Amino acid sequence: TIKTYSDFTIPYPYPVAQSIEAANGMEYPMICFNYGRTDADGTYSESTKNGMLGVVIHEVGHNFFPMIVNSDERQWTWMDEGLNSFVEYLTEELWDNKFPSKKGPAYTIVPYMKLPKDQLEPIMSNSENIVQFGPNAYSKPATGLNILRETIMGRELFDYAFKEYSRRWAFKHPTPADLFRTMEDASGEDLDWFWRGWFYGTDPVDISLDSVRYAKPSFANTANGGNRMGNRPAGPRVEPPAVNAFEDISKIRNRENSNIKFYTDRDLAARDFYWKYDRGMVVIDTSLNAKPQVQPARLPMEEFTEEEKAKYGNKFFYELSFSNKGGLVMPIIVEFTFKDGTKSIDRIPAQIWRLNEQKTSKFYVQDKEVASIKLDPMRETADIDETNNVWGGGEKASKFQMFKARAGGAPARGQSVGSNPMQLEKKSK
Ligand SMILES: [Zn+2]
């Protein structure tokens, strides 16, 4: 315990750490009391053994959280119990690869995350207000940190940032914001979305693979690809004056304020064509512009070369649509199993939900035909409904019509399209 905790935090600074046999588990600085005795004949059950190991690691571990990294356990129980349960979990895992850890692996928190909302509070609740103390203050924060370590940040980055938190806050009084901030600025990762969801909310993870569209590329009719977009009829050909239809109170007050002199009244050179146009002082002859015009499609199409056809001709296209049914965003882990039995994994960062937290999709170009798809195959994200994580294949491929946009087809931003009133006035002269 002392060695593993020292590796993940700071070197143990006290002269001793005592664990005394007692019928409970309770921590004090440098001394704690833990259960775990053999039967009278010297034998013991496996649950006694593992329970004793867990409680000794946990209570000795409290020397680090909150005795050294001295958070306020009355205000934020999770800051010492959650962090301590997390390092307890890491220590158990390094004790024996078969240790039956219960606080840490993502799937073990699923029964709690599935509970009705009236039985849940955010981890960021005052300890007096928590219904299910164990999962809320111990297991859920410990599991969240483990998900950050294994699935979101990676071990190297997480371990560095977590150690930095202990280093910065040893013998001081950190609050939750100090943990959140240190994990972000020591790692250089924006984790606000994770703190918001996992620590400030009660939503569970339930990412659903709603549908898979499967297609083979088709190169037919690409020569006249421009017809796909169609030719756009020209819009209103003479732009009307750009003045707001409603005159708001600020405009009226500015006008009625005799202390205000508008710039275009002080400097008459600033009165350009549109200053007059906006005031009805310029009349445009629109008959010059009466001939129907057709503007080209914004994205003119080009033919595919034989080389390009060869490159895409044998590919398999898949569009996966996902929805966030649980509310909590997470990375999406997609496992493809191909018809030849091989597998591949795509780990999509949680930022895919950045612009839409309800629905998202991703398009894949595969070399081989996919037999089935499964989300989160290693149960890393605490997804509470795994039945909507799978797609079985079997559908027939549809055709995916290939088009290639010509470079430079669309007008640049800020560039005028068509004719403007200034041009028309010039023409009429
Ligand atoms: Zn504890």
Image: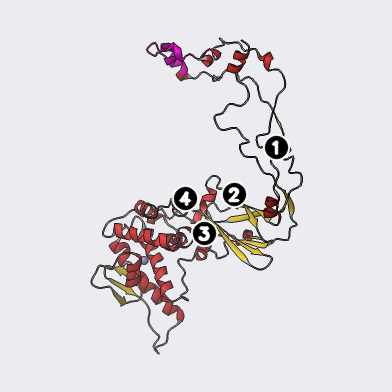
Tell me which label, 1 or 3, sits earlier in the chain.
3
Sort mark 2 into few (<14), some (14-19) or many (20+) by Cα contacts within 10 Å: some
Q: Contact (CB < 8 A) between labels 4 and 3?
A: no
Please give the residue where the numbered disc 3 appears in the rendered image.
113
The residue sitting at 66% across, 37% down in the picture is 299
The residue carrying mark 1 has its beta carbon less than 8 Å from ligand 1: no
Sort mark 4 into few (<14), some (14-19) or many (20+) by Cα contacts within 10 Å: some
Tell me which label, 4 or 3, sits earlier in the chain.
3
Q: In the rendered structure, which segment of residues is drawn in magenta?
A: 251-271
**Front-most of residues 420 and 266:** 420
Query: What predominant SS class does the magenta segment belong to?
Result: helix
Q: Amino acid at mark 2?
A: Thr
Tell me which label, 2 or 3, sits earlier in the chain.
3
Label disc, if present, on residue 193 of the rendered structure = 4
Sort mark 1 into few (<14), some (14-19) or many (20+) by Cα contacts within 10 Å: few
Q: How many marks?
A: 4
Please give the residue where the numbered disc 2 appears in the rendered image.
360
**Front-most of residues 141 and 114:** 141
Q: Position of residue 11 (x, y in %)?
A: 29, 67
- Label 2: which secondary element: strand
Q: Residue furthest bottom?
A: 41
Ligand 1 position by quadrant: bottom left
Q: Amino acid at mark 1?
A: Met
Label disc, if present, on residue 394 of the rendered structure = none
- Label 3: which secondary element: helix
Q: Position of residue 82 (x, y in %)?
A: 39, 62
